[in-house]
Image: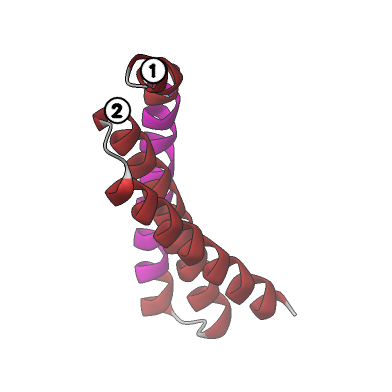
Amino acid sequence: MLNLIFVFTIIISFVFYFYFKTKQFRSPLPIAKNWYKSKANVSFGAFILVFGLNQAYLFPGLYTFIIVAILVVLGIFVIIENIKKVRHYGQFVEEEYRINR
């Protein structure tokens, strides 16, 4: 059952990654592009994190846990850094839309 939750979360995070990447490429505004890029990277960080946890659940072993530790730390780092960027760019997105109407 836990594996199904991990797989569902992996799929959802990957879908959100592609959604925000598409929004990034279609946006003509530079701050909005950076905002969507940061949102996509949060989803990618979640993908890395949950993928690592899924591997630890499926293949318990010493080498797997070493790799999983690296993936989990990397995923958490990517999520935290890009959440900061999302908050920063989010302050200016509405103003940029209003100015460029």
Which residue is at the far right?
1
Residue displayed at 55% across by 84% down: 58
Give the camera-side residue of 43 and 81. 43
Q: Is residue 32 magenta?
A: no
Which image quarter is the N terminus in?
bottom right
**82 relative position to 56: left or right:** left
Amino acid beneath label 1: Phe
What kind of element bears circle 1? helix
Disc 1 designates what residue? 92
Outermost residue on the front side: it is 101
Question: Given contact means CB atoms under 8 Å apart, are the residues at marks 1 and 2 in contact?
Answer: yes
Q: Position of residue 42 (x, y in %)?
A: 43, 47
Q: Residue at x 41, y 67 (%)?
A: 68
Q: Is residue 13 visible?
A: yes
Q: Is residue 58 above or below residue 91?
A: below
**Could you classify mark 2 by the number of other residues whose Cα lies within 10 Å: few (under 14), some (14-19), or many (20 or more)?**
many
Of residues 98 and 13, the one drawn nearer to the viewer in this rendering: 98
Q: Which residue, as the protein is rendered here, is positioned at the far bottom?
A: 59
Residues rendered magenta in the picture: 66-88
- Residue 73 seen by the camera: no
Q: Position of residue 50 (x, y in %)?
A: 52, 64
Amino acid residing under circle 2: Ile
Task: Calculate the distance from the C-alpha at mark 1 to the C-alpha at mark 2.
Answer: 7 Å
Q: Check if residue 85 falls in the magenta segment.
A: yes
Q: To which residue does mark 2 refer?
A: 31
Who's the residue at 38% across and 17% down the image?
92
Q: Quadrant of residue 63?
A: bottom left
Q: Residue at x 61, y 71 (%)?
A: 6
